[in-house]
Image (spheres, grey):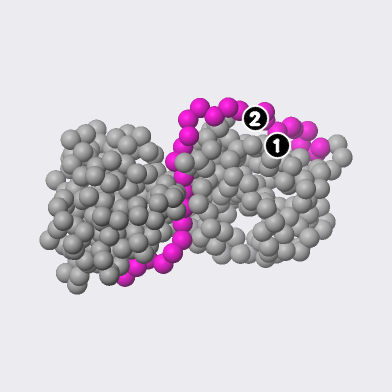
């Protein structure tokens, strides 16, 4: 999905396994990990209508989420399970449980959604501990007298480096495609029946990740180049799916590369671009960013990427004979 990416990036605390509950004192609430859409439906539908559900969307690659995991597990430990239950905490990997992320229109992590009786009452992004605590207490009341966990929230910590952000949603478009793409005149091409539906699996054999020279060529393989999880006809994450949908809606002709077919490119691009998440969009060989940045560019400038638009047609990847093949 890209974290309060560009996400608000406050200096993370110690690493915490984000989809596992952290240890809490006996008789206190914990953050329950949610691994599937059905699990989420079952857990939330069983809550009393007066119970506040604290729904925490995170991503394992996002440093700010590590800090928020500590904040939420600590906050949860200050509440005692009640009868009837008045508060419940849930943690979801935004990319793994993408159907739920789409339902809540998750576009950055960390994101904390407060929900009561099936309705969202407030959402908080970033890692401001006091902001999260105040919002929770506003809708669920203060922790029980005596503070069962006997633990305060960690102090606010300064941000040192912003992280990228995340986004989901939209149906995958139908249409076949190939891995990688070539350089000239792609704006003149539209996808056709000859486009293959999946990218070939391969490895370059390089032991230390894709070379800088190879990556430099790949990012310039098309005027607009999308590095994504899966292919445009079969995206493998919500963020890639929404990026494809946006480019298609805007009528942009683009090349693409399926990073799941080549782990060396997948890992190498993170260092090459200093951008740790996918999808990544390049224009003229220069990184634009991920989904959130692409959204912002179109919102700020309706003419963005106009020179790559296909007049009178929906956008999409270049035809098969215009796709560059991996080395």
Q: Dividing the picture into quarters, in which one does residue 265 lie?
A: top left
321 on left or right of 71? left
Left or right: where 63 falls relative to 30: left
Along the line of sight, the residue nearer the viewer: 184 or 304: 304
Q: CB under 8 Å between callouts 2 and 1? A: yes
Q: Is residue 193 above or below residue 147?
A: below
Q: What element carries label 2?
A: loop
- At x 78%, y 33%, the residue is 150
Determine if the magenta segment contains residue 157.
yes
Q: Tell me which secondary structure the magenta stretch mostly adopts.
A: loop
Q: Residue 281: which numbered mark, if any?
A: none
Q: Name the residue under label 2.
A: 156
Tell me if 25 is positioned left or right of 108 in this view. right
Residue 197 visible to the viewer: no
Q: Which of the 4 quarters of the picture holds residue 268?
A: top left
Q: Residue farthest to the bottom?
A: 193
Tell me if residue 247 is in the magenta stretch. no
Q: Which residue sits at x=81%, y=37%? A: 147
State the residue position of label 1. Answer: 130
Q: Residue, x 36% and y 64% (percent of image)?
A: 249
Residue 251 on image: x %, y %: 31, 63
Numbered disc 1: secondary structure: helix
Q: Can residue 69 be seen in this view?
A: yes
Q: Which residue is drawn at 73% across and 47% down?
A: 136
Residue 229 is situated, as x and y percent measured from the top left of the image, at: 34, 53
* Earlier-in-chain disc, 2 versus 1: 1
Depth order, front residue of 32/120:
120
In the displayed structure, 181 sits above or below 149; it is below
**Which residues are the magenta region?**
147-174
The 10 Å Cα crowd at callout 1, few under 14, some 14 to 19, many 20 or more, is some
Badge 2 crowding class, 10 Å Cα cut-off, few under 14, some 14 to 19, many 20 or more, is some
């Amino acid at each position: 999905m890209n974290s309060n990416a560009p996400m608000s990036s406050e200096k993370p605390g110690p690493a915490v396994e984000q989809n596992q509950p952290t240890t809490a004192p006996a008789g206190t609430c914990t953050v329950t990990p949610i691994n599937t859409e059905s699990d989420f439906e079952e857990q939330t539908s069983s809550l009393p209508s007066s119970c506040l559900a604290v729904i925490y969307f995170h991503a394992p690659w996002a440093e700010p989420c590590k800090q928020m995991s500590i904040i939420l597990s600590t906050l949860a430990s200050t509440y005692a399970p009640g009868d009837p239950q008045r508060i419940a905490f849930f943690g979801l990997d935004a990319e793994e449980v993408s159907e739920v992320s789409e339902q809540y229109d998750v576009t950055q992590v960390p994101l904390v959604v407060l929900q009561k009786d099936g309705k969202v009452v407030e959402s908080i992004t970033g890692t401001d501990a006091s902001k999260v605590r105040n919002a929770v207490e506003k809708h669920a009341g203060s922790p029980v007298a005596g503070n069962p966990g006997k633990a305060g929230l960690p102090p606010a910590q300064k941000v040192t480096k912003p992280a990228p952000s995340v986004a989901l949603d939209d149906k995958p478009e139908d249409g076949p495609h190939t891995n990688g793409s070539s350089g000239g005149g792609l704006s003149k091409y539209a996808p056709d029946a000859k486009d293959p539906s999946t990218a070939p699996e391969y490895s370059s054999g390089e032991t230390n990740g894709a070379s800088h020279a190879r990556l430099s060529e790949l990012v310039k393989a098309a005027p607009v180049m999308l590095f994504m999880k899966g292919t445009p006809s079969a995206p493998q994450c919500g963020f890639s799916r929404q990026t494809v949908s946006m480019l298609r809606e805007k009528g942009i002709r683009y090349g693409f590369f399926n990073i799941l077919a080549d782990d060396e490119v997948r890992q190498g691009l993170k260092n090459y671009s200093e951008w740790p998440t996918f999808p990544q969009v390049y224009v003229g060989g220069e990184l634009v960013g991920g989904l959130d940045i692409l959204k912002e560019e179109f919102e700020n400038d309706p003419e963005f990427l106009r020179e790559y638009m296909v007049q009178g047609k929906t956008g999409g990847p270049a035809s098969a004979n215009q796709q560059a093949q991996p080395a």
